[in-house]
Image (cartoon, coloured by chain):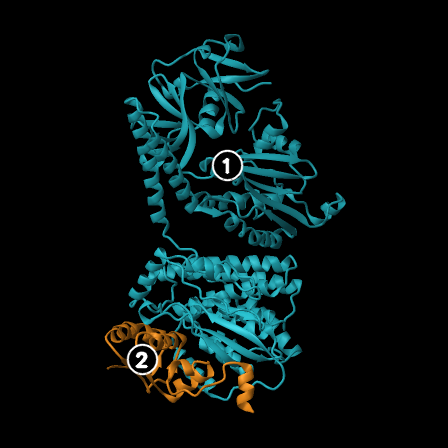
Chain colours: A cyan, B orange
Amino acid sequence: MNAEEIQAIFFAECEESLAAAEAGLAACKAGTHDDDTVNAVFRGVHSIKGGAGAFGYIALQSYTHTFETLLSDVRDGTVAITEALIDLLLRALDTLSDHVAATRGLGEAPDDAALQAEMTAAMAANAGAAPAATPATSRDDDEAPELSDFDFSAMLDDIAGAIGQTGAEPDTEATWTARVRPHAEAMRNGSEPLLMLREMIDLGGTCTGCDVSQVPPLDTIDAGTGYLGWTFALPADVSEAAVRDIFDFVGDECSLAFGDDAPMPPVRQPALRAVAPPATATMAPAAPATATAASEIVAPTHRPAALAAVPAAAAPAPPAMGQSIRIELGKLDKLIDAVGELVIAQAMMAQRLAGDGLAVTEELAMLEGLTRDIQESAMAIRAQPIGSVFSRVPRILRELTASTGKHVRLEVSGESTELDKTVIERLGEPLTHLIRNAVDHGIEPADARLAAGKPAEGTLTLSAEHKSGRILIRIGDDGRGIDRDRVLGKAIEKGLVAPDAVLSKEEIDLLIFAPGFSTAAQITNVSGRGVGMDVVRQNVKDLGGRITIESEPGSGTTFTLTLPLTLAISDGMVVNVGDQTLVVPLANVVESLRPDPAEVKGLGAHRAMINVRGRFIPVVPLHLAVGAAGAVERPEQGVLIVVETEGAGRASLLVDAIVDQRQVVIKSLDTHYRSVEGVAGATILGDGRVALIVDVDGLVAHSLADSGLQEAA
Amino acid sequence: MSIISLPPRCDRAAAEALLPEMIAALGSGPLAIDARGCTQIGQVMLQILVSARRTGEGAVIQASPMLRDTARRLGLEPELFDDAPVVATTRADIKGADA
């Protein structure tokens, strides 16, 4: 692994640390002030500082140092958690995020002098109030960038010295028992468990025994695993928290158990890691470690036992380290591609066998099941919780509060809902637009809200959920709702609709997605330039999704994004049109029917409407759109597929016959050829032919615009 | 008998570097570990020493004062050294010893 790769991992970890700190501060703001929450924030900032030091990012390191020192005071309880402090910490976190971005080469380093002064003032104020109240110990060790090996030798010298000194003898008063079992990570990155044991001795503890029973013979020992466990007797006046503090820095990498009856925590076997953590100073002699890792695959029985026996006394464990691996996205994409090819190959084989009269064979069914399993697992690897997008929202809201003066409370649900990474990445922009829009246009200023009998603080609701193979994301506000008269007036003024047009509520709402549309009386720097909502709709469409609006005047607006779970594979209806085979995405399909001739009403020479249970729906002959020869031309001779579209309501596509309904691997036309209107992409059929996937929205909107028809009730 | 000398600084890197050598040596007969020059030790080397003692015929360790002291403070003296006095392993024993 080269330095750049290690750096890339550092930045990826920075993102995680920032997210963890953000989540922690959000919890603090919501009123959770417990140790775990504060520690999570501290650890996030601390690990960024460590990496910054190791890579020599001076500005980042010095900024995080100030930040961390303040957090450490908060953690130690010498600085009280107040609303003002949390706001300061949140601003500090935003600046830290900018610092990290700048270090990565994305933007300028922020000017943090004022903020640093403010943070220092928060500390200094404390120092005046409660001098030297800081109880602990490990501050000096924390000062050192822990990835550096620099002062390691001094630290080790120290161990000898301190351990050699006469530790305070246990007095004759009562003592209590603490058991310590350091694990792999506690021995990495320049951290040394023996130093922490030294601190226990400094606290007055005495080692009453060392558990060596787990140490394996030399030829099977793994230098990275912690096998030793120590039992200490501590004076009664030393609190459990003081002992926890010593090991706080290594998190769950030192298992602790308190109390005379508590069993010694078990040895934790290291999980197989694809990529070693950045600071592992031991790349060269990796052979023994690899051998051990491999043997674990064969005999994985240790781990469940180790996990099952977490002592009740130990702190609630955060998600276990080493249970995940970091994979380059390119490799994953290759896997997904290969799985796509597998799906195609399987379909081809099925078709070939069917041709030979062997369609129903057990082996084929098995292969089909396995292919689907592999595909689902491969997709699951790419799936990420949407929380990573939602976690950026608090910052957006803080910035909006600063620029608009509106205070907004955020309610989030379903943040663990998973969807494809590509979808997640491309969701950020539309979501940001919608949130800005909701705060700027939707939520009223505080005085207007109070006058309307609402709380002064607005509420923004974000939710995500799975629903029938799609994902629904809702962004709702409790603001004034869409002022439809104003929207319609503005649209008429801009010539978007005819002055005498009669539009339904929903149609008026959809006008806000028209390019260049804005009702904002004045252009703010937040929104109002009329670029935004149409971009949002385009973004969502590019993702294969749809956006709908529900708005109630006076009580708020909710935007609902309906997105596919993945962009690589989708369910489609395979249809024949003349000499062509096409795929209609199942997401658009409402129903399919063979029309009764009496239900078809002709309009002019080529146009027709069909009466579906009292609703008249325009018929769109697919063969005209794709130029297929020899297709069925009269609706009553073919099959109609009723589809739901974004802008043009329902329509029915006229096809010759429905051949199949199955999963298709989407191949982008943009990358392989060029973008074609009315075509969403292409796929390869079981017989090796290429079939176009119909872009239902585009195609229907286009052909209805030509014919002037629309659904009518 | 093979003899392996430990460097003054027995950190993780030193431990990992010496481990294959120790495995080979213990596989071919008695082993003596010369730790008289050892001035610093970390947990990784400490547990390798414990393991070396418990493997095969068991290594004989010659300790520096620092190592000896660390082992005593961390309850490992009887485990690592043949000539270790019988020491307290429980609190009651410590009291007894004090008395």
Labels 1 and 2 touching (C-beta < 8 A):
no
Looking at the picture, tell me which residue is in the foreground, A600 or A627.
Answer: A600
Mark 1 is surrounded, within 10 Å at the Cα level, by few (under 14), some (14 to 19) or many (20 or more) other residues, namely some
Task: For the N terminus of chain A, give its image quadrant.
Answer: bottom left
Q: Is residue A206 above or below residue A52?
A: below
Q: x, y percentage for residue A143?
A: 48, 75
Q: x, y percentage for residue A193?
A: 45, 74
Q: Is residue A450 left or right of residue A380?
A: right
The residue labelled by disc 2 is: B59
Residue type beneath disc 2: Ala
Q: Is residue A596 above or below residue A523?
A: above
Q: Is residue A683 above or below residue A419?
A: above
Residue type beneath disc 1: Arg
Looking at the picture, tell me which residue is in the foreground, A679 or A562.
Answer: A562
Q: Nearer the viewer, mark 1 or mark 2?
A: 2
Q: Is residue A277 left or right of residue A617?
A: left
Q: Secondary structure at mark 1?
A: strand
Chain to which the residue tagged by mark 2 belongs: B
**Residue A137 occupies which quadrant of the picture?**
bottom right
The residue labelled by disc 1 is: A470
Residue most extreme to the bottom:
B99
Quick check: do tags 1 and 2 share a chain? no
Q: x, y percentage for residue A118?
A: 59, 69
Looking at the picture, tell me which residue is in the foreground, A491 or A507.
Answer: A507
Does residue A678 show up? no
What is the CA distance from the residue labelled 1 to the residue labelled 2?
64 Å
Residue drawn at (43%, 13%) of the image: A638
